[in-house]
Image (spheres, rainbow, N blue to C red):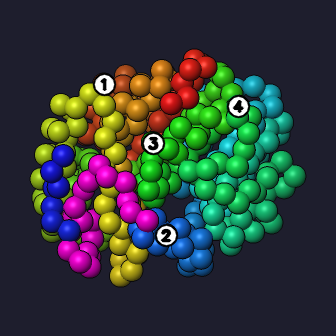
Amino acid sequence: MPNHSSASQHPRHALECALSPRLPDAATRAALADFYRTNAGYACQQSGHDRLYFRRLTSVIDAVISGARPRILEVGSGSAGALRAFLTSRPGATAIALEVSSASLKRAGEAGGAALYPVAGSALEIPIRNESVDAVMAFEVIEHLPDVAKAFDEMLRVLRRPGHIIIGLPNHASLWTPIEDRLRGRSRRAFGVERGRGAWRWWRRNAGLAWHKRLSRRAEFLYRQPVLEGVEGGDADAVYYAAPLDLLRFFRSRRADLVMTSTQMRFGRLGRLLPVELQGSTVMAWRVTDATARG
C-alpha cells in the first residue's frame, strides 16, 4: 500500500507521518517502551481518569460478561480504574491488571484490594498461562502497540473458551470525527486540527483510507511514527492508526463473533447498521468459542 503522506524528520502531528503496513522498527519500539515505562507525567494523566471516562467500556462489560466468579485480564490497565469499577459491581470476580509502567502498577496495587492482581508485562508477551482468564479487555491501548495482530493473538492464547475479548479504541480513520471537529471548531492537535482548521485534511486522508480498506478483504494494520515530544494527549504518541474495520476483519478470521458494541448500546438497531467509518471512538466485544481461534 502506498504511503498516504510523506513523513517529515520531526513530525508535529499524525498527518505529517506516513502510514505503512510494515511493523515499526526496533528504534521506534524501544522509544515507545521507554516512554510508557518511565514517563511519570503520562502515568499520572492515566490515573486521573474517573468512572465517567470508562462508562462505555463498563457498560459493554456488564452486558457481555456473566457468571458469578469471572476472572478478567486488562491489558494496559494504567492504574486499573476500569477494573476497580468492575470489581465493585462483581464481588465474586477477580482481575489481573497488566501494565508496563511501575508508577501505574503501584497505584493499582494501592487502590485495588485483594481481588485485583497487578502484573508487570507487555501486551506482546503476556506473562499468563494459556486459557486462564474468562475475558480480556484493552481500553484506549491498542493504538499504542507496535504489533497489534501479535497482541490480539496473545489475548486469544490466554482466553478460556468460551470467553470474551473487549477492545475500546479511538477511530483515527473516522469520516465523522473530522467533520464534527470542523463544525464545532474543536482542536485536536495530535491530528493538526486547531479550532476546526485542518480538519478537512484529516478527512481527505481518511476518505482515501476508507476506500482502500473496504476493497481489502483482510485486516491491514497501518503504523506511523509516534510523536513523543511536543504534543500532549489526543494520541499524538500512538503508533497504530486505529481503525475499527481492522478489528472486525481480524477477529472474523479467528472465528470470533461480534456480540456487542458501545454504538449498538447507544443507538440500538441503528447502531448495528451504522458503518464503522462513520463512527467515532467505540468499544467492541467478541465471543470466542472455537478452540482453533488462536491464530
Does residue 17 belong to the magenta stretch? yes
Q: Which amino acid type corresponds to the residue marked 4 in the rendered image? A: Glu
Density class for disc 1 (Cα within 10 Å; few <14, some 14-19, many ≥20) is: few
Say which residue label 2 marks: 30
Q: Secondary structure at mark 1?
A: helix
Secondary structure of the residue carrying tag 2 is helix
Give the residue at mark 3: 149
Q: Residue 131: give its label.
A: 4
- Kind of residue sitting beneath label 2: Ala
Q: Describe residue 262's horizontal placement relative to residue 166 as left or right.
A: left
Of badges 1 and 3, the one in the foreground is 3
Distance between the Cα atoms at labels 2 and 4? 29 Å
Q: Which residue is mark 1?
A: 273
Q: Is residue 189 above or below residue 139?
A: below
CA distance for labels 1 and 2: 40 Å
C-beta proximity under 8 Å, tags 1 and 4: no
Q: Secondary structure at mark 4?
A: loop
Closer mark to the observer between disc 2 and disc 4: 2
Query: Which of labels 1 and 4 is toward the front?
Result: 4
Q: Earlier in the sequence, mark 1 or mark 3?
A: 3
Q: With respect to residue 58, does 234 lie above or below?
A: below
Highlighted range, magenta: 8-26
